[in-house]
């Protein structure tokens, strides 16, 4: 473990000579990325993510050098890993962790409000890269206002989701999903039709939950 942000130690953070012990979880690579960034980018297990966070709680709001991306952004910035990101990983990223013996905490929800160098918020990436409905729901439950965040182009999260090509079609990876859904409807197999129907239902749920907080009551 390493010293916390206010210089007070948690547990045994110093050796017998009084020198601080440094955790590998707190060390950046040349791009300014922590191990937590890398682990989330490939949708690592929740056990791995939890250990990295506990070893370096302030890493939750650590931004990379050029892209200025937090671990929360990295969790959803890839169209390949975002749909596979465990819901438990997001819950861990949005939790609060002690940073000293004096009752100070690092609240992971702070990262929800942090935009990257492109002016994108984590919720924009989550919507753009087709993360699960459950993950979108957790974002909103923890910070309802995030659905009104605008990126550098003035887009809301729902813009990011709707701008995705073939939004209501299944991804073209995997076994059942691997079959091309660009074929005429009459040529789709039964499994392909079922999968396409399921994808449409999930996307409609996402749209509904993103729109609900924006609706203003009529007087």
Image (spheres, helix red, strand yellow):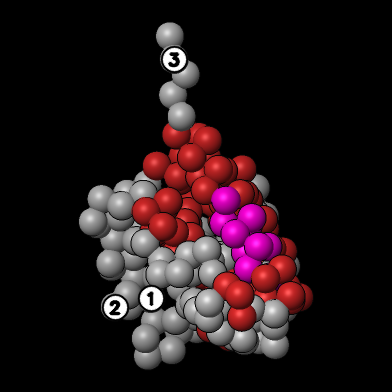
Residue 118 seen from this side? yes
In this rendering, position of residue 185 left or right of residue 151: right
Quadrant of the image containing the N terminus: bottom right
Q: Which of pointers 2 and 3 indicates the residue nearer the eye?
A: 3
Q: Residue furthest top?
A: 219
Q: Give the residue at mark 3.
A: 218
The spot of residue 63 in percent (x, y) is 40, 70
Taking depth in this image into account, of 89 and 133 the one nearest to the observer is 133
Name the image quarter holding residue 90: bottom right
Q: CA distance from mark 2 to mark 1?
A: 6 Å
Query: How busy is the neighbourhood of tag 1: few (under 14 within 10 Å), some, or many (20 plus)?
Result: many
In this rendering, position of residue 202 left or right of residue 71: right
Q: Secondary structure at mark 2?
A: loop
Taking depth in this image into account, of 25 and 192 the one nearest to the observer is 192
In this rendering, position of residue 138 left or right of residue 152: right
Name the image quarter holding residue 2: bottom right
Is-magenta flag for residue 56?
A: no
Residue 10 seen from this side? no
Query: How busy is the neighbourhood of tag 3: few (under 14 within 10 Å), some, or many (20 plus)?
Result: few
The magenta region covers 195-204
Asked if disc 2 and disc 3 are in contact, CB closer than 8 Å, the reply is no
Taking depth in this image into account, of 94 and 7 the one nearest to the observer is 94
Q: Give the residue at mark 2.
A: 66
- Give the mark nearest the N terminus, 2 or 3: 2
Q: Give the residue at mark 1.
A: 64
Tell me which residue sits at (43%, 89%) in the image.
Answer: 29
The spot of residue 57 in percent (x, y) is 59, 65
Q: Residue furthest left?
A: 153
The spot of residue 33 in percent (x, y) is 44, 81
Asked if disc 3 and disc 1 are in contact, CB closer than 8 Å, the reply is no
Asked if disc 2 and disc 1 are in contact, CB closer than 8 Å, the reply is yes
């Amino acid at each position: 473990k390493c010293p916390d942000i206010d210089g007070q130690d948690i547990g045994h953070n110093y050796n017998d000579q009084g020198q601080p012990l440094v955790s590998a979880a707190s060390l950046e690579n040349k791009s300014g990325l922590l191990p937590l960034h890398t682990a989330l980018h490939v949708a690592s297990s929740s056990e791995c993510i939890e250990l990295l966070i506990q070893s370096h709680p302030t890493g939750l709001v650590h931004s990379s050098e050029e892209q200025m991306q937090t671990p929360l952004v990295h969790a959803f910035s890839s169209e390949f890993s975002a749909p596979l990101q465990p819901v438990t990983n997001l819950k861990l990223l949005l939790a609060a962790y002690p940073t000293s013996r004096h009752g100070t905490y690092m609240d992971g929800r702070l990262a929800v409000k942090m935009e990257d160098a492109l002016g994108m918020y984590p919720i924009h990436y989550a919507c753009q890269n087709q993360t699960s409905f459950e993950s979108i729901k957790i974002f909103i439950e923890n910070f309802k206002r995030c659905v009104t965040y605008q990126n550098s182009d003035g887009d809301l999260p729902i813009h990011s989701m709707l701008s995705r090509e073939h939004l209501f079609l299944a991804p073209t990876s995997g076994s059942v999903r691997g079959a091309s859904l660009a074929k005429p409807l009459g040529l789709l197999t039964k499994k392909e039709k079922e999968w396409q129907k399921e994808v449409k239902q999930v996307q409609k749920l996402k749209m509904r939950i993103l729109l609900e907080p924006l609706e203003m009551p009529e007087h």
